Image (tube, grey):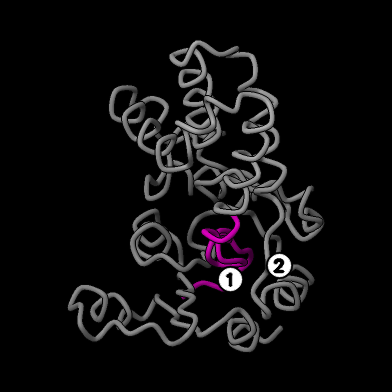
């Protein structure tokens, strides 16, 4: 296997648990709406808005990869359909986005991230809308590539190739790090990456899924319990 010269790194559920963050951000958004358009907020909670986004994604697949555009468009459409001022969608979305950046990092994430960044250039590869600068970790990254930027979401190889281009390195010199078997591990290997570190916190079992067992057994797949174990494996 070629020497690893740089890393690509997933964000949500690799550096922090994403759903507690999303739920808090959606609650903050709902509170903001309830203060300004109470009748709308009563009928449009997080579940109703999520259902509308799913409908929009199905009807407009060109939006499906871009979570920010999809959420903003959904807010604008819901407000207009309810007879409210659709211009409220932009400030409402900014409330959501600000709270979306208030993540609770896994205990290992920041210590490991600083150790890894001291040795390797790192490019974030994400389907989400995390803002590294607002989170205070932009200094650990050479660049960030998102589905919204590239026009496709993981597991499409184009988002991985965009990360390799940012690094100026061939895929065969790269290690991808992420928690999702399909969108991170298999997708990066399919894109030509030298290896993929599969972060399985809590010792997530794969024994009941033959495909996952086969994936974990591949020499290019490095199952690790957390990012500190990855640091040890890389000798950083």
Q: Earlier in the sequence, mark 2 or mark 1?
A: 1
Residue 229 covered by magenta stretch: no
Q: Please rate how many residues cluster around mark 1, counting C-alpha atoms within 10 Å: few if below 14, some from 14 to 19, many from 20.
A: some
Q: Position of residue 152 (x, y in %)?
A: 43, 36
Query: Considering the image in quadrants, where does the C terminus appear?
Result: bottom right
Identify the residue at image location x=50%, y=39%: 147
In terms of depth relative to the viewer, which is nearer, 209 or 27?
Answer: 27
Residue 86 shown left or right of residue 65 in the figure: right
Identify the residue at image location x=34%, y=57%: 190
Label 2 vs label 1: CA separation?
9 Å
Foreground mark, 2 or 1, reads 2
In terms of depth relative to the viewer, which is nearer, 72 or 32?
Answer: 32
Instruction: Say if 96 sits above or below 91 in the image.
Output: below
Instruction: Say if 227 sits above or below 18 in the image.
Output: below
Residue 12 covered by magenta stretch: yes
Asked if the residue under mark 1 is in contact with the one under mark 2, i.e. CB atoms within 8 Å, the reply is yes
Secondary structure at badge 2 equals loop
- In the rendered image, which residue does mark 2 sit on? 120
Q: Position of residue 169 (x, y in %)?
A: 59, 53
Give residue 208's mark: none
Residue 148 shown left or right of residue 193 in the figure: right
Q: Position of residue 209 (x, y in %)?
A: 20, 77
Query: Can you tell which quarter of the image residue 29 is in?
Result: top right
Q: Magenta residues: mostly which secondary structure?
A: loop
Secondary structure at badge 1 equals loop
Q: Please rate how many residues cluster around mark 2, counting C-alpha atoms within 10 Å: few if below 14, some from 14 to 19, many from 20.
A: some
- In the rendered image, which residue does mark 1 sit on? 4
Q: Position of residue 214 (x, y in %)?
A: 23, 78
Query: Residues in magenta?
Result: 1-21
Identify the residue at image location x=26%, y=75%: 212
Identify the residue at image location x=25%, y=81%: 213
Instruction: Say if 58 sits above or below 212 in the image.
Output: above
């Amino acid at each position: 296997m070629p020497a690893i010269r740089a890393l690509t790194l997933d964000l949500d559920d690799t550096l922090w648990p994403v759903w507690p963050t999303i739920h808090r951000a959606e609650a903050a958004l709902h509170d903001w709406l309830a203060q300004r358009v109470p009748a709308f907020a009563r009928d449009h909670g997080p579940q109703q808005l999520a259902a509308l986004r799913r409908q929009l994604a199905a009807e407009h697949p060109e939006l499906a990869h871009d979570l920010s555009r999809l959420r903003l468009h959904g807010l604008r459409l819901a407000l207009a359909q309810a007879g409210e001022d659709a211009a409220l969608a932009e400030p409402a979305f900014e409330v959501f986005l600000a709270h979306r950046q208030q993540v609770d990092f896994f205990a290992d994430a920041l210590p490991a991230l600083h150790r890894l960044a001291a040795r390797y250039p790192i490019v974030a590869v994400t389907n989400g809308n995390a803002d590294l600068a607002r989170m205070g970790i932009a200094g650990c990254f050479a660049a960030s590539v998102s589905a919204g930027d590239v026009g496709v979401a993981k597991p499409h190889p184009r988002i991985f190739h965009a990360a390799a281009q940012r690094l100026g390195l061939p895929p065969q010199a790269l290690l991808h790090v992420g928690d999702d078997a399909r969108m991170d591990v298999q997708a990066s290997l399919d894109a030509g990456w030298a290896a993929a570190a599969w972060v399985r916190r809590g010792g997530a079992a794969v024994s009941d899924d033959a495909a996952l067992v086969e994936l974990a057994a591949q020499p290019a797949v490095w199952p690790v319990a957390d990012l500190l174990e990855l640091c040890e494996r890389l000798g950083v």
